[in-house]
Image (spheres, rainbow, N blue to C red):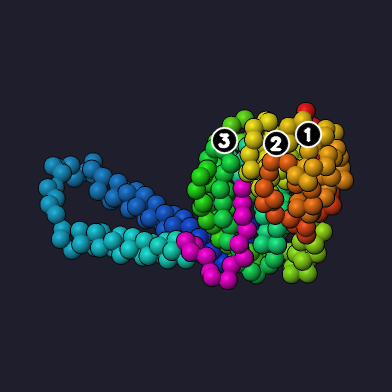
């Protein structure tokens, strides 16, 4: 029966996919069986009880048949109960991730997917996971409702603003596996695609250490904007000139800043770099020294990105 599975369903990427497929194929064959059975009986009755020209006469009066009615009520009942528990079993198993699952944060926004790994590595539109280890996705949206749909693993879950939704899978088959956005979210909806790469443990570690291809290719100011939005900078530093917990980034590039210790500095690349890595070194006058250090949390290129992004905030 594998030929039928291969014909109508995508790759089976996980044990859950196998269970879903099993039930699905059962439903297909059950439907085929009853279609042939009922259409066959229909045809046979038409032929068997046709009005014979030679005999003629009135159609016989047929009342009920208790035995037959019990059979055609109870047999479907049993079949439906089997289908219910089969589906319920898979649904429950798929609802709760195992305790040891690796947690990856998924953020959807018009029109891309970003993934954040336990060690802080980020990637855009490509999710790398080690083979054979359960992965739990904790998902939220920055704008409208999106939906994370991973057909090869037979899972789909809406991604909502202001709320977390979860999804988990245990990847067994090397990728890439296509991810779709399955909730219409605007003009770029059909381009909102991502890929899941299932790596062996060594390749996954190597990938974590080296970072994401998409991020490497991204122009510096865009990368900086992404860091600004996703690494917490935006909580304290506005980009429209309003005062927050920290100085606004609007128009500070190349301008002088008065410091708490009375000195004056010019905001240049070295000052920005130092303020990211050692925020307490030069605190701007009128602000508390509350910023945490980003030492070890940002790659060199990401710091450069932040610098280039600040230049764009005229
Ligand atoms: Cu995001 Cu459709």
N-terminal label among 1 and 3: 3
- Label 3 and label 2: CA atoms lie apart by 32 Å
Residue that carries the numbered disc 1 in the rendered image: 252
Locate residue 217, reporting x and y percent.
Answer: 83, 44
Camera-side mark, 3 or 2? 2
Q: Nearer the viewer, residue 10 or 269?
A: 269
Query: For residue 244, what is the image quadrant?
Result: top right
Stretch of the chain drawn in magenta: 94-107
Confirm whether the magenta stretch covers residue 6: no
**Measured along the vertical axis of the image, is residue 187 above or below residue 85?**
above
- Residue drawn 68% across and 43% down? 287
- Label 1 and label 3: CA atoms lie apart by 35 Å
Residue that carries the numbered disc 2 in the rendered image: 248
- Residue drawn 39% across and 52% down? 35
**Measured along the vertical axis of the image, is residue 63 above or below residue 91?**
above
Q: Quadrant of the N terminus?
A: bottom right
Locate residue 242, reporting x and y percent.
Answer: 64, 32
Asked if labels 2 and 1 touch by Cβ distance under 8 angstroms, the answer is yes
Confirm whether the magenta stretch covers residue 106: yes
- Residue drawn 72% across and 51% down? 123
Whether disc 3's CB lies below 8 Å from ligand 1 is answered yes
**Measured along the vertical axis of the image, is residue 175 above or below residue 242?**
below
Camera-side mark, 1 or 3? 1
- Residue drawn 79% across and 42% down? 262
Locate residue 166, reporting x and y percent.
Answer: 52, 56
- Identity of the residue furthest to the front in this view: 262
Q: In the drawing, what numbered circle is on residue 185?
A: 3
């Amino acid at each position: 029966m594998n030929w039928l599975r291969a014909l109508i369903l995508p790759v089976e990427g996980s044990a859950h996919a196998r269970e879903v497929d099993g039930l699905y194929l059962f439903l297909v064959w059950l439907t085929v069986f009853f279609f042939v059975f009922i259409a066959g009986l229909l045809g046979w009755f038409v032929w068997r009880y046709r009005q014979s020209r030679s005999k003629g006469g009135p159609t016989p009066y047929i009342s009920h048949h208790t035995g037959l009615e019990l059979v055609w009520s109870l047999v479907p009942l049993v079949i439906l109960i089997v289908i219910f528990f089969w589906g319920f079993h898979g649904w429950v198993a798929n609802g709760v991730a195992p305790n040891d699952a690796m947690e990856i944060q998924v953020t959807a926004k018009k029109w891309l997917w970003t993934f954040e790994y336990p060690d802080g590595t980020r990637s855009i539109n490509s999710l790398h996971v080690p083979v054979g280890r359960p992965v739990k996705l904790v998902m939220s949206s920055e704008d409208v409702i999106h939906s994370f749909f991973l057909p090869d693993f037979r899972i789909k879950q809406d991604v909502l603003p202001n709320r977390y939704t979860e999804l988990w899978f245990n990847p067994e088959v090397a990728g890439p596996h296509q991810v779709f956005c399955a909730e219409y979210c605007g003009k770029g909806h059909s381009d909102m695609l991502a890929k899941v790469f299932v790596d062996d443990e060594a390749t996954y570690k190597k990938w974590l250490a080296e970072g994401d291809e998409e991020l490497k290719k991204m122009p510096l100011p865009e990368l900086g904007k992404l860091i600004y939005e996703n690494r917490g900078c935006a909580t304290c530093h506005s980009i429209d000139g309003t005062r927050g917990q920290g100085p606004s980034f609007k128009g500070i590039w190349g301008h002088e800043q008065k410091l708490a210790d009375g000195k004056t500095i010019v905001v240049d690349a070295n000052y920005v770099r130092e303020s990211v890595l050692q925020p307490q070194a030069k605190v701007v006058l009128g602000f508390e020294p509350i910023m945490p250090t980003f030492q070890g949390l940002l790659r060199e290129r990401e710091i450069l990105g932040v610098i280039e992004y600040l230049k764009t905030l005229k």
